[in-house]
Image: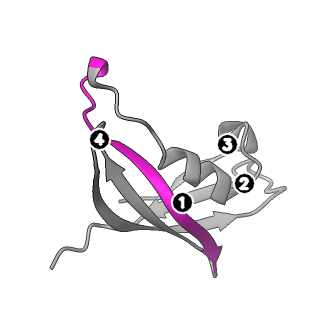
Amino acid sequence: MGWLFMSRGGMAPFATPKAYLDNQCTYPPDPEKGRATGLRVLKSTVRSGAYYAACQSYDLETQRETFAIICLIKWTPGAKSGEEFGYKDSAPLRR
């Protein structure tokens, strides 16, 4: 997967990479729209150019899988190009 960069306006209304990515990883189940499961962030942090989150999928009845999401991030407020925030998710690691 490649990098996705955006301006601060593209992140709106979120002021930090952590807040933006927490929001992207949080949504409810919506059976009416064909989405049987939701996702929630249990805990997240940004350290050394990376976003780490413990996430849990769930449905209307029970909790499901708990797993990690890791994204490399670049945060350069005031960048001349206007692209202040970029992230790159990692490929799934299955064993």
**Disc 2 to disc 3, how far (Cα)?**
9 Å
The span picked out in magenta is: 32-47
Callout 3 touching callout 4 (CB < 8 Å): no
| Element carrying mark 1 | strand
Circle 4 packing at 10 Å, graded few (<14), some (14-19), many (20+), is some
Q: Position of residue 53 (x, y in %)?
A: 49, 66
| Element carrying mark 2 | loop
Could you tell me which residue is drawn at 42 percent across and 36 percent down? 28
Circle 2 packing at 10 Å, graded few (<14), some (14-19), many (20+), is many
Q: Earlier in the sequence, mark 1 or mark 4?
A: 4
From the image, tell me which residue sits under label 1: 87
Image side of residue 50 versus residue 93, left or right: right
Number of numbered discs on residues: 4
Could you tell me which residue is drawn at 28 percent across and 47 percent down? 62
Q: Amino acid at mark 4?
A: Asp
Callout 2 touching callout 3 (CB < 8 Å): yes
Callout 1 touching callout 2 (CB < 8 Å): no
Q: Amino acid at mark 1?
A: Tyr
From the image, tell me which residue sits under label 2: 84
Q: Amino acid at mark 2?
A: Glu
Q: Quadrant of the N terminus?
A: bottom left
**Disc 1 to disc 4, how far (Cα)?**
28 Å
Residue 58 vs 1, above or below: the answer is: above
Circle 3 packing at 10 Å, graded few (<14), some (14-19), many (20+), is some
**Disc 1 to disc 3, how far (Cα)?**
12 Å
Closest to the observer: 13 or 73? 13
| Element carrying mark 3 | helix
Q: Give the mark toward the camera: 1 or 4.
A: 4
Q: Earlier in the sequence, mark 3 or mark 4?
A: 3
Does the magenta run of residues contain 46?
A: yes
From the image, tell me which residue sits under label 3: 11
| Element carrying mark 4 | loop
